[in-house]
Image: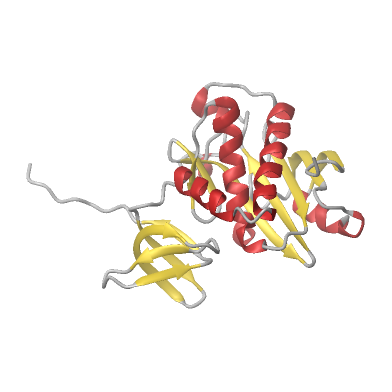
Amino acid sequence: MIIGSKFYYLDEVDSTNEYAKRILDKATEGTVVLADVQTAGKGRLDRYWYSPEGGIYLSVILFPDKPLLIPILAGVAICDTFYTNYNVLLGIKWPNDILLNEKKVSGVLVEIVEPAVIVGIGINLNITEFPEELKETASSIFIETKKRLDKMMVYNDLCREIEDNYQMLKDNKASEILQKWRNYTIMFGKTVKIETPEGIVKGRVIDIAGNGALVIMLPDGKIEKVLAGECIIVKECKAGIT
């Protein structure tokens, strides 16, 4: 097993991704940085990631041939971990959010630092309380399931699932990873608005492409593939007679 074969365990760190960058010159494939607390945890677009004790915060250093699918792989591995080992079904919101009962319980931040890819994963595992500004959108596995799981057991299970999915990718079985993503996602049939560097794309999600792009049907029936962007699920109001 290469994932976690080299392992840095820290009581506290600014960010596991930033620490991974600092040790990159001596890292091997599968090196993991794991911390109990992050003081400057971050998500996509440099957003702050709340990282108190009770969560799992790790970064995995990989050297993949197909980096585009690594965010998809990471999301699938998180869902595999909880469904296969703990019978907890999570949902994937493209591009990097993992939800339970419509609240975010995990996220993925992938950064390319050539020749490596650093896969940052945050899991709100046994966190019991969130700041007021996060209570509407964030939660933890413990809050939603009333199950207090052993952190190191979940960590080991996650490493194994990352390893299994990464091996699939190396064995040219990306289609199997994408099919698992389809099984876990909450996106299909949803109307979304995606902010991209080229502008806003709005339409209905119908699939995921082989490179991880979200496949959108536009209002005029045309198909567009979006590889990256900020995605908002549009809640449609249905008029009715009362």
Q: How is the image coloured?
A: secondary structure
Q: Nearer the viewer, residue 236 or 167?
A: 167
In this rendering, would 28 be left or right of 180?
right
Q: Position of residue 123 (x, y in %)?
A: 63, 39
In this rendering, would 85 be left or right of 138?
right
Query: Is the N terminus in the top left, top right, bottom left or bottom right quadrant?
Result: top right
Residue 98, relative to residue 45: is it above or below? above
In this rendering, would 191 be left or right of 2?
left
| Residue at 54% from the left image edge and 32% from the top image edge | 83
Residue 70 visible in this rendered orientation of the protein:
yes
In this rendering, would 18 be left or right of 219?
right
Residue furthest to the left? 241
Query: Is the C terminus in the top left, top right, bottom left or bottom right quadrant?
Result: top left
Q: Position of residue 75 (x, y in %)?
A: 58, 47
Q: Nearer the viewer, residue 94 or 42?
A: 94
Q: Position of residue 238 (x, y in %)?
A: 19, 50
Residue furthest to the bottom? 198
- Across the whole image, how many numbered discs are drawn on residues? 0
Residue 128 visible in this rendered orientation of the protein:
no
Q: Position of residue 107 (x, y in %)?
A: 59, 47
Q: Nearer the viewer, residue 144 or 75?
A: 75
| Residue at 56% from the left image edge and 49% from the top image edge | 177
